Amino acid sequence: MTNQHPKRYTVTAALPYTNGPVHIGHLAGVYIPADIYVRYLRAKKQDVIYICGSDEHGVPITIRAQKEGVTPQQIVDKYHEIIKKSFAEFGISFDNYSRTSAPIHHKTASDFFKKLYDEGKFIEETTLQLYDEKARQFLADRFVTGTCPKCGNEQSYGDQCEKCGTSHNATDLINPKSAITGNTPILKETKHWFLPLDQYQEWLKNWILEGHKDDWKPNVLGQVKSWLDDGLKSRAVTRDLDWGIPVPVKGAEGKVLYVWFDAPIGYISSTKEWAEREDKDWQPYWQSPDTKLVHFIGKDNIVFHCIIFPAMLKAEGSFIVPENVPANEFLNLESNKISTSKNWAVWLHEYLLDFPDKQDVLRYVLTANAPETKDNDFTWKDFQARNNNELVAILGNFVNRVMVLTHKYYDGVVPNTNKFYPELGQIKVFADKMGQSIENYKFREALQELMNLARLGNGFLQENEPWKKVNEQPEEVQNIMFTALQITAALAYLSEPFLPFMATQLKNMLQIANKNWDEISVSDGNYLIESGHQIGTAHLLFEKIEDEAIQKQLDKLEATKMQNEKSPSLTLPEGKGIEPQKELITYEQFSAMDIRIGTILEAEKVAKANKLLKLTVDTGVDVRTIVSGIAEHFTPEEVVGQRVQVLVNLAPRNLRGIDSNGMILMTETKEGKLKFVAPVGEVDNGATVR
């Protein structure tokens, strides 16, 4: 059932969730493997598109927004830009990087839902769902925690247990608690639309477990089999939320598309966006049987890409389904699980600041240590050792010796040859091995072959010692250096999928153009770099990383560990967590904030916004409008006349069409109730808080 000779490839990488930056676990699990695969296909002159974008809907976004006192749109705008910029600087070569808040995605996802709805592919049911009476809202997904019904983990989310990886519904949890207030929720009726996955059980079983039993990774097949053995059940494709894509049917007011229905459609909408920009037709990349669709994901996304999304595509009827879903396992950091909530991670945007111009070093280390078949561990000492002992001492050393000697002996001109060394015949063997490994999603294996080619070059130089023969055997040295230059050129071409920045540098140093991967071979009369060719100036491709730079990273992690031990995110009896201390700021940063005493003069609810009040505040400096997310805690009547502290020099923000000029300072009780930070005693409006 595998498409052996596709006309084109559609390659997707899991949409990163925009409630935080990208870290090395994401890179090792998804984005570097996908980038290697795509760069290889481009080197073979294949028709391939590499598609991704920011996943901007779902409960974690709204939780993050509540925590930071901003809107969900502000959260996704912030992290979308950080993620997109980091990917670009790191050399992840997407053909299009979109976002699910884009109008083209809203339309694509809505149209997809509407087609299935019109064709009767959904089941409409009124069911009992968890409801927080205090917060006055239904508890979807990560708004609720409880005990996992499968493994007993007491901190499972409402949609997935991060300990055992099982996906479930919030109502499946044992002893559920609201993540908003800590209260025990009640069951309340609500109407939703469900995709009857059980109707696709046999098709999924035949398609995956029979049709792909020999070419899909064992971890993927194992998880799919577990789900199928348990028996598939109908799964809701809508949620009771106010952030997301509105369900496009009558009677669905206040409901949005479930993020795991809308997010994978983002691959399709991102392709449409690319096609519009490039004046191409998007449909062959998603609807032609001679296209090979490949999803690169982490293991926590297997069920959505191998069961739910394919069932959606099958139900819609006009789309192809993936030919492979090469999911990786997890990457740990210094023997501990990467945790965004505990800041136990190496963030990509911070790495790029700490190690500028060392993108390829991280790409190399994360590929050499990729969690392809089991969880692996990233350590800073290993990062240093692989750079110094492999990239510098093997690959960089070989290239530098060849370049320096060519300039020393021949003023940078490739010499003539009259001898064909057996090492030249090995170049084609290495290219074929690497290609086969990449096509089988064995990127560590392919990278090892690249380094073996560099080792072959070093061994060839050591064995033939041109520096000892240059005076007595000048013709022999020409043959040696010509051969060494062919290996160097091969490294320039074959390293491109793995080390794109180095490959570009090396091709520029050699002054050679790009070449089709299938033509990377040397035979008598067919060479990668010809005699008489002038090469450019030599410079070091890699530099040693000193202990000081590594210790700085270890110190940063140690400070994070101490902070977590000092101020852990405790769960109080009422369920309200204590947030850890934030990063230190300077006195100058604090003094830049202008906080004044003020009085709320008027208050009214913002239309179609359950959480927002429009306040008119006398700050002593002026009378201004401030929009505050306190409507669930106070009525407008309760806040009029309230003395408050106001951050007056906060940049204006537009919230629901209203310009908000400042921020009211609030605190929160352990029960989750907001309180004003009011001045004590008689203080005039406009007084400065110091």
Image (spheres, rainbow, N blue to C red):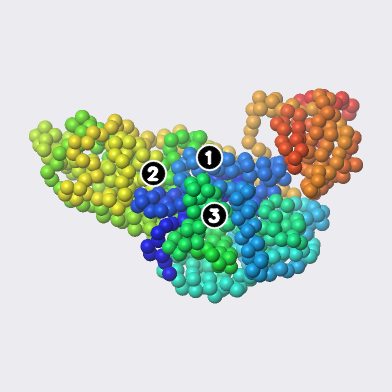
Residue 430 placement (x, y as % from top left): 28, 53
* Closer mark to the observer between disc 1 and disc 2: 1
Residue at x 86%, y 39% (from the top left corner)? 603
Quadrant position of the C terminus in the picture: top right
Residue 139 image label: none
According to the picture, the residue beneath numbered tag 3 turns out to be 267
Q: Within the image, what quadrant is residue 308 found in? A: bottom right
**Residue 413 is at least partly visible in this image:** yes
Residue sitting farthest toward the left: 472
Residue at x 61%, y 70% (from the top left corner)? 197
Direction from residue 342 to residue 68 in the image, left or right: right
Residue 594 placement (x, y as % from top left): 74, 26
Residue 85 image label: 1
Q: Residues within 10 Å of mark 3 (few under 14, many from 20)?
A: many
Tell me the kind of residue under disc 2.
Leu
- In 3D space, how far apart are the residues under numbered discs 2 and 3 (Cα atoms)? 26 Å
Residue at x 67%, y 39% (from the top left corner)? 581
Direction from residue 488 to residue 238 in the image, left or right: right
Residue at x 66%, y 70% (from the top left corner)? 120
Direction from residue 562 to residue 512 in the image, left or right: left
Of residue 643 and residue 377, the one placed in the foreground of this image is 643
Mark 2 or mark 3: whose residue is earlier in sequence: 3
Residue 423 placement (x, y as % from top left): 20, 49
